[in-house]
Amino acid sequence: MRQALIIAGFGGQGVVKAGILLATAAMLENKHCTHFPSYGAEMRGGTTNCSVIISPEEIASPIINQPDTIIAMNTPSLIKFEPQLKSGGLLIYNSSLIPTPPSRTDVEVIPVPANELAEKLGATRYANMVIIGAYIGRRKVVQIGSLKNSLSIVFPKFNAETASINYQAMEEGRKFSESYAK
Amino acid sequence: MSEKKLMKGNEALAEGAVRAGCRFFAGYPITPQNEVPEYMSWRMPQAGGAFVQAESEVSAINMIYGAAATGVRCMTSSSSPGISLKQEGLSYCAGADLPLLIANVVRGGPGLGNIAGAQGDYWQSTRGGGHGDYRIFVMAPNGVNEMANFPQKCYEVAYKYRLPAMILADGIIGQMMEPVEFLYPEIDPKTLKEPAWALGVNDGREKRRVNSYDLREGFLEKMVLARAKRYREIEENEVLYEEKMLDDAEIAIVAYGTSARVSIAGMKLARENGLKVGLFRPITLWPFPKARILELSKRVKKFLVVEMSMGQMVEDVQLSLNGRAEVHLHASPGASTMTAAELYKTLENIMKKGAKEYAAAK
């Protein structure tokens, strides 16, 4: 099934790279995929986002008008993208940094304490891995094994230990969303 | 042949050029094509070539003029306002019969416009762009895979017929990432034969001359006519296009690049709702596939041109058809992109409500 998602957050939180990992995993499974970043006046500390589409069929445009899923890593991103989410869609937000829950009631909402789960593994920088793990825990667009394999492609300079921590972070996110009470 | 790799359009374009034998790149930064020079800045030295960040677009195209004159496969890239600045140099290169690759990752215009993807440079690209009586070979990729594979075709045509070749992309194709597969073996420029006109060290061979002017009575005319003959050969031999679902179509969408991708989605939506829609995608914008479009008009009586501009390619479609079929337009100017739902609405207006010819704009 076709899945269109937008991942948004602060510059530096790794939202663009998280999207590239998902698209690479889809490519490894021979699915059609596109990744489209916001570009232009982006900067570290500012907001940024990327659009990822994974589909069994050819993808028309990489620009998403009505996303099936929104992943919001910070408050400005939630405010910007929450209204665009398709009715019945999935809204995953980083509850470590977003104190006010989303107001939409026609969508599925999963608060993921991404920073806290990442800190347990050693550093907040793994929060992007936690959150995409949480995403595939709820929407099986790609196998976690493919996501693991895409780590060495997207980050060829990672040593075994770094790759392993990143993979654990994805696993933590996946377990969290799978066990999250509906 | 190689495995699939997820690449950004601009990077795939740069890598494709290197694999096609490009060994000199000169350019100047502008969004949304910055990844091309960024990639070339490390890749070109790695491949044994040279990368120059020029002080301006004008400077970059004139460096290409010089490099091309020596027969080396070379490239420059920019986006709309920067391509305008390069037009004088491009005209000189065309006048000197030089093969080169120029890429335009089109953004919104006119003027400084904005940095989103657009198709407003169709006229500039297909009508030459600079002063004088000339053509350039123009290819329009519809995604990252074609960005990777078109440079090779561009060099092939450019060297065979001695003219500049352009890849006309847009900000969306430049910025997006998709799986890429390089469909041809990497070319080692050392294995390429030196062109008979290339300048270099004269070790006693006959004198060679590369420039764009001739003041002697009647000589310029001869030069232009010889070029026109080659242009006719290109029009006969090098036209490329793609057709989808045209066999039973009652209306044909004509669209290139990003517009053609969105048109596929619009076509599918329309087919689900009982409209017999097909798609004709010009891949070469010059030479334009006019003979094929005319042939299609024997059985398709309505054409809808879809473009991210006020309506530029629509004129080539009208010229091709010469009044033999109805021509409609769905225009998304100002760096906006049409949606499948909008296209369906336009198709419905034409097929069910008898919308007036050429009136359907966004």
Image: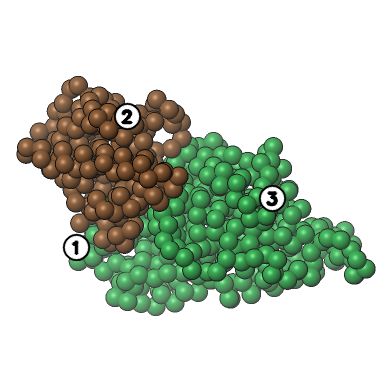
Q: Which residue is mark 1?
A: B273
- Mark number displayed over residue A123: 2
Distance, label 1 to label 2, CA atoms, is 52 Å
Looking at the rendered structure, the kind of residue marked 1 is Asn
Residue B347 seen = no
Outermost left residue: A182
Q: Position of residue B102 (x, y in %)?
A: 61, 54
> Residue A42, located in which quarter of the rendered image?
top left
Q: Are marks 2 and 3 on the same chain?
A: no
The chain identifier of the residue carrying mark 3 reads B
**Label 3: few (<14), some (14–19) or many (≥20) C-alpha neighbours in 10 Å:** some
Q: Is residue B85 above or below residue B289?
A: above
Residue ID at (60%, 57%): B18
Looking at the rendered structure, the kind of residue marked 3 is Ala
Residue ID at (54%, 59%): B16
Looking at the rendered structure, the kind of residue marked 2 is Ala
**Label 1: few (<14), some (14–19) or many (≥20) C-alpha neighbours in 10 Å:** few
Shade of chain B as shown in the rendered figure: green
- Mark number displayed over residue B50: 3
Q: Are marks 1 and 2 on the same chain?
A: no
Q: Nearer the viewer's eye, disc 2 or disc 3?
A: 2
Residue ID at (34%, 73%): B246
Q: Secondary structure at mark 1?
A: loop
Residue ID at (50%, 59%): B148
